[in-house]
Image: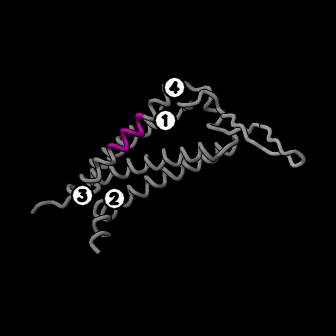
Amino acid sequence: MAALVHPGDSSALGLMVRIMAALIRISSVCCRGVSPLLFRSSSLIRPLAVQKKDRDCPYLISAKIHATPSSHAGSGSKAASLHWTGERILSIALLGLAPVAYYYPGPAVDYSLAAALTLHGHWGLGQVLTDYVHGDFKIKMANAGLFLLSTVTFAGLCYFNYHDVGICKAVALLWSK
């Protein structure tokens, strides 16, 4: 009689933990500082046309628009290039994982999806925070919250893969109903 193998056996789990650790190391290298790619300053100056109430002639004032946080303004472009490359590699990997997950569902694909989806969401929400959160304390708190959210997400997906049917089978079950 053949022994049943649990979908989250320790060898697959160890492999996925090493993959996630490698992805986190890539993420930490890439997120140490990103300077703007198109603009070399941390803010853009845009003229606004405003009409004075007592006169009909318009005059120009300027508005400061923050393109990136000032903490990233002094960073080199090497980190930005690595981060951009990492995002593209992850996007291509996710495109490749979709048909693999459909045709060959299994624990390796489940844990790979857990790692890739978590990192993809982490980087995406990190960009939202970069665009919309300003102020040193607010940035630190938002990044701490994002790290906590990403950690809980990855742990939850791994728990689901180990103790339940896994991501691939769960999606297949949702589509079958």
Mark 2 lies on residue = 161
Q: Can residue 34 be seen? A: yes
Q: Whole-percent x and y of residue 126?
A: 54, 45
Asked which quadrant contains residue 155, the reply is: bottom left
Q: Which of marks 4 and 2 is nearer the N terminus?
A: 4
Residue 18 or residue 177, whichever sits in front: 177
Is 15 placed left or right of 44 in the picture? left
**For discs 4 and 3, the disc positioned in front in the rendered view:** 4
Mark 3 lies on residue = 102
The magenta span reads 85-92
Mark 4 lies on residue = 77
Amino acid at pointer 3: Tyr
Q: Is mark 3 on a helix, strand or loop?
A: helix
In the image, what residue occupies the spot 27% across and 50% down?
108
Q: Whole-percent x and y of residue 158?
A: 38, 55
Q: Counting other residues with Cα less than 10 Å from the Cα at mark 3, is it few (<14), some (14-19), or many (20 or more)?
A: some
> Which residue is most to the right?
54
The CA distance from mark 4 to mark 2 is 38 Å
